[in-house]
Image (spheres, grey):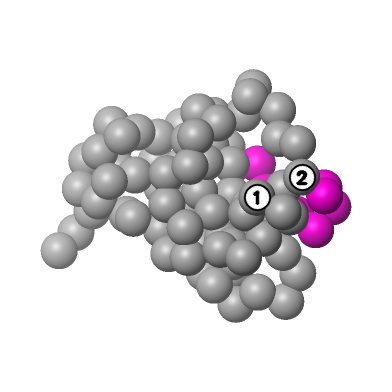
Amino acid sequence: MTEPGARLQLLTRANCHLCVVAAETVTRIGAEAGLGVELVDVDADVELRIEYGDRVPVVLLDGREHSHFTVDVPRLRRDLGVPPGPA
């Protein structure tokens, strides 16, 4: 299972187009907030696969589910204290 130490995590799996897009987005916003992103493969952990496998990608912030399928960019920016991006 994921460790609570990482502030920003993205649960992904191989061959997932939505995961690639989400990783780019979360990595960019995380960098703006001065945070790294831990990418976690749900298929490497049975518990994660059972809990999250049918809705990857999943963004976890402080160990709690923040969004899934797509990144809720405005909410993530707000919750990380990052100013809104260009319109």
| Residue at screen point 48% across, 42% down | 65
Number of marks in the rendered image: 2
Task: Classify residue 79 as left or right of residue 64.
Answer: left
Q: Amino acid at mark 2?
A: Glu
- Residue 43 within the magenta-colored segment of the rendering: yes
- Magenta stretch, residue numbers: 38-46
User: Mark 1 near mark 2, Cβ–Cβ under 8 Å?
Assistant: yes
| The C terminus sits in image quarter | bottom left
Give me the disc on residue 47: 2
Residue sitting at 56 percent across and 63 percent down? Answer: 55
Q: Residue 78, which numbered label?
A: none
* Element type where label 2 sits in the image: helix
**Residue 50: x %, y % from top left:** 72, 54
In the image, taking residue 20 as reference, residue 1 lies left or right, namely right
Figure quadrant of residue 70: bottom left
Label disc, if present, on residue 51 of the rendered structure: 1
Q: Position of residue 1 (x, y in %)?
A: 75, 36
Image side of residue 78 versus residue 68, left or right: left
Determine crowd level at label 1: few under 14, some 14-19, many 20+ residues with C-alpha closer than 10 A.
few
Circle 2 Cα neighbour tier, 10 Å, few/some/many (<14 / 14–19 / ≥20): few
Residue at the top extreme of this rendering: 5
